[in-house]
Image (cartoon, coloured by chain):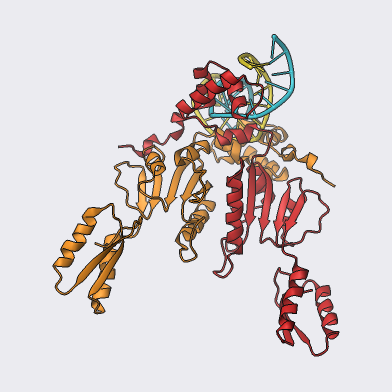
Chain colours: A red, B orange, C yellow, D cyan
Amino acid sequence: MITRNDWDVRKSLTTIKDVAKKAGVSISVVSKTFNNYADVSEETRQRILEIAKELDYSPNIVAKNLSSKKQLTFGLISSGVLNNNEKDNNAFDIFKGVYKAVSESPYELSIYLIDSLSQKQQSYLQYCRERNIGGAILQGIRTDDPYYKELINTNIPCVVLDIMTETENGLIGSVSINNAQAGRDIAGHLLKNGHRDIVVVSVDTRNLRQQRKVKRRSAGLPGIRFSIRRKPHRLCGFF
Amino acid sequence: MITRNDWDVRKSLTTIKDVAKKAGVSISVVSKTFNNYADVSEETRQRILEIAKELDYSPNIVAKNLSSKKQLTFGLISSGVLNNNEKDNNAFDIFKGVYKAVSESPYELSIYLIDSLSQKQQSYLQYCRERNIGGAILQGIRTDDPYYKELINTNIPCVVLDIMTETENGLIGSVSINNAQAGRDIAGHLLKNGHRDIVVVSVDTRNLRQQRKVKRRSAGLPGIRFSIRRKPHRLCGFF
DNA sequence: CTGAAAGCGCTTACAG
DNA sequence: CTGAAAGCGCTTACAG
């Protein structure tokens, strides 16, 4: 029976050294064949691959991460997964989508879920640096989050979801729905169905211009009344 | 404007070397203070901590993982998260629970979600080895999964969820509900409510002894009829 | 096409 | 209490 004293899992690991030795080549060549370098003779390449399979070798990702100049892992920073309400599956869907996409790529995914209930929050930048994360996907983050601002202003490329960024940093992309058009569509739908008394909830109260715009426009529509409910929320209102 | 050519994120990383130099000590001492070794004088320890904060230093986890003899990361191998049906949140709940627990610990969590739709499946053992994973939690895995068997027979400690293990390997733990008792309770409930014609679905058809047991027992209960529907499933049946 | 060597950022005996 | 050195398993110029 194996006991807890035998926990040194690593001892049985086959390393690049083992493969090199058995193949009678240097570890450089083994590394190169595993990274598809062209300058390895077809013959030795085949021999190495064979021996690697025989020895059940596959490169250690941690070592690869440390030694490589390239960044090999993505970060997914999400606030919606951990404390989601049953109704909102968006964050979870994004999580699954990102996971699948990355798992079909040669990259690793490091997941940082924000727990609003927990105090032990860490700087996103620090999280990324500690793990050699080369690019991040942010979901459910508020624009006024200080850690968000910090991360955005580094040279780490980011894709932010569901919020519009106003940075001229060329490394920041954003994916979100066209809120203005969506608002127009929804309003149009309601009007077409004969509704004339419409409430706009979820307006970002920090954006007063939006509200004025709504009022101004609705004033131009005879017989239609727009009310506004102030409910702090990170989604934009209509128009 | 930052462009894609500045992607070398790493250049701005403060390393243990920077801290050591500025503190006028060797990196060994810095390492020791960050790992709470006792044999560092209180004075230098304070100085190092101060300088580390000043330099915004935090140890690189990848390097730590590679150099340390200890295993610093857990693996969560789950089949239920990616292709769950809306009704079954169990896998997702487990995922969240494991995530929270690990994030409150000094360990890392590496997540391997099995996509039954994808062909690109990898050996769990290989997954663990490549990432220096020291222990794994398995959810939604079938006992006849060859990769499961492979992993179970290594010296990597595992906790399997929702299935009973029959290994005498001391490194395997399992957490699941008491199926036998639950079955008894359910049947009792049905009987108490006057039901007399009961169907047992979800019986693991590979376990014929279970079925015989059910029949034998039900034969002893006058007026009660147990039917059995064969539906391959990894959950146990009743009794 | 191949290999020796330096390096990634840490940890850990070991000697002082 | 402190530091020099070897090592973790790879990658990557560089020289041959």
| Residue drawn at x 19%, y 59% as measured from the top left | B213
Q: Quadrant of the C terminus of chain B?
A: bottom left
Q: Is residue B204 above or below residue A232?
A: above
Q: Quadrant of residue A167?
A: bottom right
Q: Is residue A60 above or below residue B107?
A: above
Side (left or right) of A50 relative to A107: left
| Residue drawn at x 73%, y 46% as measured from the top left | A156
Which one is nearer the viewer's eye here, A37 or A8?
A37
Residue that protrudes farthest toward the bottom in the picture:
A223
Percent position (x, y) of residue A229?
72, 81
Q: Quadrant of residue A2?
A: top left
Percent position (x, y) of residue B218?
18, 67
Which one is nearer the viewer's eye here, A53 or C11?
A53
Percent position (x, y) of residue A16?
54, 25
| Residue drawn at x 84%, y 85% as measured from the top left | A219
Percent position (x, y) of residue C4?
63, 14
Q: Is residue B216 above or below residue A21?
A: below
Q: Is residue C3 above or below residue A75?
A: above
Q: Quadrant of residue C3?
A: top right
Side (left or right) of B9 relative to B37: right
Can the viewer see residue B121 in this picture? yes
